[in-house]
Image (cartoon, rainbow, N blue to C red):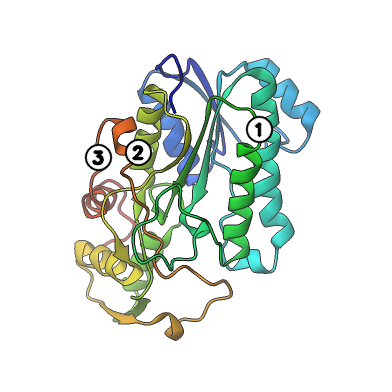
């Protein structure tokens, strides 16, 4: 589904844009595209105070809201479900109502963890979700709360396995550990779609520019296991550390992860107008532009 007028928003407000890894990337990509973009955090506006949010929107008058706020501590969410649902389900619903009242476009990011990983092939947006964790369930609830509203300018993007500049992420943590150790053991039987935040941000801008709406998947091309992603990062860094594959059973976690949650992009590519590059190429750029270890 597409908006009648295919153009970028004039003024965007990115919640989480002041200090979030994805939020910062979105602010940069929108500004590079010529969009007047305001980065906001919870220090600027109380997301859960309807009056404060209304006043903030009235003051800045955006025509597009980008929600890059999320509770992303997958294991911790099992012990803090209220907080996970507050940020991942309640907040999108509040923003959706505000966008509906003002006729704003709204971009919201979801996750591959809404799936159980049992399909045996990359997931399409139309595939039935079945989250295995509180995190995944809370993100699915956020999607559903938005889809229940009448928002013709709604764009919900499921993404996965984010890494990028600005904050700690899986790749950065692996490199920090590899710089200290001679051997790492990383899960090799969980597969997903590693995605660079700056690539995701550029893809989101392209989708906005082309008037894309609805529920889509947004990731870099290719797929990998956690072990493959870790091993490639260590190789590129030239670190003297062996990265050994282990099964999920060898690294028990509080939350259950999907075994294979690779996301299919065939519905997204025509709307974006290009195919996102392979995650390996994106990883090279991340390693070169944002070094995390001294080799």
The quadrant of the rendering that contains the C terminus is bottom left
Sequence-wise, which precedes: disc 2 or disc 1? Answer: 1
In this picture, is 97 found above or below 177? above
The numbered mark at residue 268 is 2
What residue is pinned by disc 1?
149
Please state if 115 lies on the left or on the right of 191 as rendered: right
Residue occupying the point 62% across, 18% down: 103
Tag 3 near tag 2, CB within 8 Å: no
What residue is pinned by disc 3?
275
What distance separates the C-alpha of mark 1 from that of mark 3? Answer: 30 Å
Residue occupying the point 31% across, 61% down: 293
* Residue 19: x %, y % from top left: 54, 42
Please state if 243 lies on the left or on the right of 251 as rendered: left
Q: Quadrant of residue 14?
A: top right
| Tag in front: 1 or 3 | 1
Tag 1 near tag 3, CB within 8 Å: no
Q: Quadrant of residue 44?
A: top right
In this picture, is 7 found above or below 174? above
What distance separates the C-alpha of mark 2 from that of mark 1? Answer: 22 Å
């Amino acid at each position: 589904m597409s908006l009648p007028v295919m153009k970028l928003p004039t003024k965007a407000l990115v919640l989480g844009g002041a200090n979030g890894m994805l939020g910062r990337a979105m602010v940069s990509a929108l500004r590079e595209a010529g969009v007047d973009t305001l980065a906001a955090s919870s220090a600027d506006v109380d997301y859960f105070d309807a009056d404060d949010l209304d006043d903030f929107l009235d003051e800045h008058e955006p025509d597009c809201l980008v929600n890059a706020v999320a509770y992303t501590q997958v294991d911790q969410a099992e012990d803090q479900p209220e907080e996970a649902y507050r940020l991942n389900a309640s907040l999108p619903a509040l923003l959706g109502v505000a966008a509906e009242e003002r006729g704003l476009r709204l971009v919201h990011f979801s996750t591959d963890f809404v799936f159980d990983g049992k399909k045996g092939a990359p997931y399409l947006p139309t595939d039935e979700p079945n989250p295995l964790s509180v995190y995944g369930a809370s993100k699915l609830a956020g999607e559903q709360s938005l889809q229940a509203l009448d928002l013709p300018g709604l764009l919900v993007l499921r993404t996965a396995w984010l890494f990028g500049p600005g904050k700690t992420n899986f790749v950065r943590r692996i490199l920090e550990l590899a710089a200290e150790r001679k051997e790492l053991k990383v899960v090799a039987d969980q597969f997903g779609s590693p995605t660079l935040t700056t690539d995701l941000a550029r893809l989101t801008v392209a989708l906005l520019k082309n008037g894309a709406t609805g529920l889509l998947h947004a990731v870099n091309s290719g797929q990998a296991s956690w072990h493959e992603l870790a091993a490639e990062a260590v190789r590129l860094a030239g670190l003297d550390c062996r990265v050994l594959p282990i099964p999920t059973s060898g690294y028990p976690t509080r939350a259950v992860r999907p075994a294979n949650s690779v996301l299919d992009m065939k519905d997204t590519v025509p709307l974006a107008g290009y195919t996102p590059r392979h995650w390996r190429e994106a990883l090279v750029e991340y390693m070169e532009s944002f070094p995390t270890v001294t080799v």
